[in-house]
Image (spheres, rainbow, N blue to C red):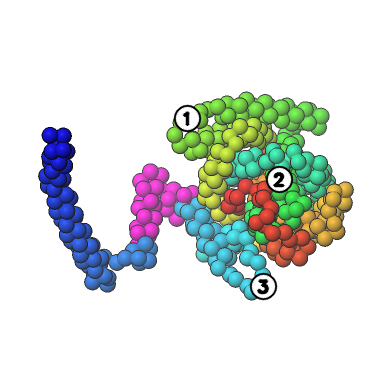
Amino acid sequence: MYTTEPENEYSEDKNIQSPITSMILSYSNTSKQEETKKIVFSNTEETKPQMKKGACPPRGTLNRYITNGVLHVMLWCAMWSVSGPHIFFGGNLSGLLITFYSSKMGGKLLELIRIPSVPQLPPLLGMLLAGFTIRNVPLLSKFVQISNKWSSTLRNSALTLILVKAGLGLDPQALQRLRNVCLRLSVGPCLMEACSAAVISHFLMNFPWQWGFLLGFVLGAVSPAVVVPSMLLLQENGYGVEKGIPTLLVAASSLDDILAITGFGTCMSIVFSTGDILNNIATSFRNILIGVLVGTILGFFVRYFPSEDQTNLPLKRAALILSMCITAVLGSIHLGIHGAGGLCTLMLTVVGGMKWSNGKIRVQKIITTAWDVFQPLLFGLVGLEVSVASLKSNAIGICVATMSLALLVRITSTFALMSFASFNVKEKIFIALSWMPKATVQAVLGPLALETARTSAPSLEAYSKDVMTIAFLAILITAPNGALIIDILGPKLLKRHDPNKIKLELTRLEHP
């Protein structure tokens, strides 16, 4: 009785399992058949495009070129439907498009030039020469006509992007750790070059003192577009990382630009204002106070708005910062509060970015993408301002002499200031020579003085043209030579350590 029940249960289990196992076997067989069908079908599908490889429509590179060409034509048609005659040759939009694409091509052509055992030249040099070529070739210059209002707005927008990049690029930890030597490197050489340029231009070019100091602050800024990529490359290879030399130069370059732009704004308000000097200086301090106060308030606002729980947070932060900063810079110009917009931008980005921690890197990448659009326009417009026909016979020689003597003072003072730090002689030489490239800030500040003189004080246009010429020559001479000096002397003068054993201290971003 008790023995038969388990047997019956076991037999029932076998009866139950038998149809299940048969179903599983049949399902596996059908699945195998379906898999073989899929494989055969996928193989036949893969062979179909191979059989039609040379048929129309075209594919690959030809298809991409046709698509991009049609896309650019349709964008031109869309802009024509909105702006009307401005898009035709001789209009503002057509001039900007020609300048943009010519500068892009100039930068790409310079990237293609490869000289054995010589580092690659910065693309911004090709952009600058493209604008210079358009201006001085009569056949091209008559098709490129850009109004002063448009070019001024674009340059001030580019200045805003430079200030935003400088504010977000400040590393509080690096500044705290290297505060003494960083302050000496960012403040000392800039002030020494500004003062020496003022003295030299006063006696050599007959500049008034206020114009001499304005020229000095134009020349006093170093170019992060040249210094930062070279420092990142050296640090990735392990050169100078033990003493933090790449970190020092990157952090100090932002502070150097901030000081130069602030000094330029103060000199601009003094040069183009009426009244006594004391009143102008008081007005300048008032503008500085307004910029710092408004920028600090807006900086605390963007710390918490938008909140962390929102989607597309980096994009919203970047859009909010750009809209606020461009409004501050352009609005301060319209209100006559010169210099306040730039300081507002700096305080906003520094105060706001300190709270974002890791999210700041994504915002920086979005700002860098916007800079990639403005950079060709900026350097192309600088080249358009320099006309060989309008230069005096001895102007180039005097301008080069003024710029070279001021640069020599900068290099010497940099070496002397680094003597108080724990660097050896080779490292001091490298830091002093690496602190010479000029590009982005000069491309913005040089034309701003010229445009302000054309609109508000035509009698001062001669001085502003000389400032513009010196800024152009400074970019043309120091940017490529500075990049070559950094890339060639860095491995020879700096001590190398294994980059895998040393923690990288720089934010890895692509720069101008």
Per the rendered image, the range of residues in magenta is: 66-93
Residue 27 in the image, given as x and y percentages of width and height: 16, 52
Q: Secondary structure at mark 3?
A: loop
Q: Earlier in the sequence, mark 1 or mark 3?
A: 3
Q: Which residue is mark 3?
A: 117
How crowded is the residue under tag 1: few (<14 C-alpha within 10 Å), some, or many (20+)?
few
Q: Is 260 displayed left or right of 56 in the figure?
A: right
Q: Magenta part mainly helix, strand or loop?
A: helix
Q: Secondary structure at mark 2?
A: helix
Quarter of the image for the N terminus: give it. Answer: top left
Q: Which labelled disc corresponds to residue 335?
A: none
Q: Which residue is mark 1?
A: 309
Mark 2 vs mark 3, CA separation in Å: 29 Å
Q: Quadrant of residue 399?
A: bottom right
Q: Secondary structure at mark 1?
A: loop
Discs 1, 3 touching: Cβ within 8 Å? no
